[in-house]
Image (spheres, helix red, strand yellow):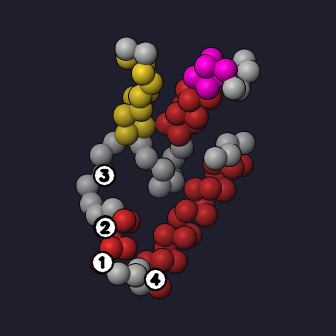
Amino acid sequence: SDPGSYQGKQDHFYTEAGFLAVLDGTSTPVILEVGEAHGERYVIEKFIDGETLDAKLKRGCLSEAEALRFAISLAKDLYIIHSHGFLH
């Protein structure tokens, strides 16, 4: 379908959500359910208890070790996602 059409966008939504649901070993959210109700699409992700990156940064800079761990994790996840043809 045409990527710019409603159907194309809907197809992309479900394709991307389905892909994220099967990713393993990454720091991407765990997808519990994908669906549509009353004409609205939704994704339910597993709740992860803890401090957000935004809250941490409001308290000050990350330590060098924290920033490096975050950057390495992000780079690995982006490599996996991009190697499967997903761009964002």
Q: Which mark is residue 59?
A: 1
Three-letter code, disc 3: Ile
Do the CB atoms of the residues marked 2 and 4 lie less than 8 Å apart? no
The residue lying at 43 percent from left, 47 percent from top is 29
**Cα distance between the residues tagged 2 and 4:** 18 Å
Q: Is residue 87 above or below residue 32?
A: below
First in sequence, mark 3 or 1: give its number.
Answer: 3
Q: Residue 85 location in percent, x, y?
A: 72, 42
Left or right, 56 with respect to 65, comes to left
**Cα distance between the residues tagged 3 and 2:** 15 Å
**Cα distance between the residues tagged 3 and 1:** 20 Å
Q: Which residue is mark 3?
A: 48
Q: What is the magenta range?
A: 5-11
**Cα distance between the residues tagged 1 and 4:** 16 Å
Do the CB atoms of the residues marked 1 and 2 lie less than 8 Å apart? yes
Q: Of circles 1 and 4, which is in front?
A: 1
The residue lying at 58 percent from left, 34 percent from top is 16
Q: Nearer the viewer, residue 86 or 23?
A: 86
Q: Secondary structure at mark 3?
A: loop
Q: Residue 47 location in percent, x, y?
A: 30, 46
